[in-house]
Amino acid sequence: MADTLGRGKILLGQRPRVTKSLSGTIFEMIWQGGEYVPSDEIKTPRHTSLLGLTIGDVLNNGRETAVGYKQNDHIQIIDSAGKTIWDSPDSYGGSMIYFDAPKDDRGQVENKQYFPMRLVVWQNSAKKESEVIAVKNHDMAGGKLEFRKFTKTHIEAFTWSGIDLAPSWKSRQISGYIPDFTVGDFDNDGQDELVAALVIKD
């Protein structure tokens, strides 16, 4: 699901590849003949997962642009031709949810494939511009080991500067890790709130 500025909420879907379940052609889905069917293709680089991808006015130019995670958890902005026009120097997200993929070599005990986390494109009405909001879970091993152990976390927002996604604001750092978050008017006061789940201890 993507919350667009001009068209409201739209549903996205992905047709997985046979050998890569977290990649494949991504479509906007429409309701037709009593079921959801693929409509317009959203062009992306070959190994882009729909999980962790959304569309919105990322560049603040009035057009819909895709933003999502690369396989290494770096954020990428994708143009209408499916080319990456920018990717973050640091990794973000950091999910603990994974599935066991087929082993790549004989020496592997298991091949954990972690699902990418949510990204949100949020319209900041006070500044009249879109922000990309992401979680940054800090892995104590820096992503260099096969297992993940997150000790601290924060949420960070970015605004397109014309050349990159520049930091706009971030929450304070807290112990534990955030598995998911969203933005919405949860107390019906006309103002959006940031709501996150926090795991303090496994």
Image: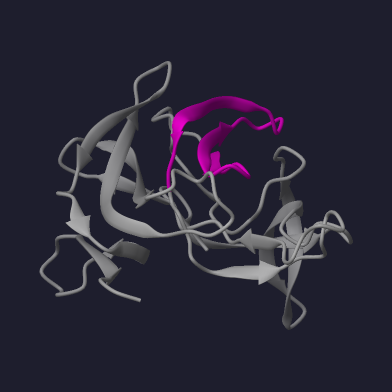
Horizontal and vertical percent position of residue 164: 42, 22
Name the residue at 41% across, 60% down. 149
Name the residue at 73% across, 50% down. 40
User: Number of numbered discs present?
Assistant: 0
Residue 64 visible in this rendered orientation of the protein: no
Horizontal and vertical percent position of residue 57: 44, 38
Tell which residue pokes out farthest to the bottom in this image: 34
Horizontal and vertical percent position of residue 18: 89, 61
Residue 92 visible in this rendered orientation of the protein: yes
Nearer-the-camera pick, 113 or 39: 113
Name the residue at 77% across, 79% down. 33
Q: Which residues are magenta?
A: 64-92
Name the residue at 66% across, 63% down. 112
- On the image, which quarter does residue 146 sit in? bottom right
Horizontal and vertical percent position of residue 34: 73, 83
Chief SS of the magenta region? strand
- On the image, which quarter does residue 190 sit in? bottom left
Tell which residue pokes out farthest to the top in this image: 163
Nearer-the-camera pick, 175 or 66: 175
Is residue 69 on the magenta stretch? yes
Is residue 84 on the magenta stretch? yes
Instruction: Give the quarter of the figure containing the C terminus.
Output: bottom left
Q: Is residue 94 above or below residue 199?
A: above
State the colouring used for the structure image.
one colour
Nearer-the-camera pick, 71 or 142: 142
Tell which residue pokes out farthest to the left in this image: 189
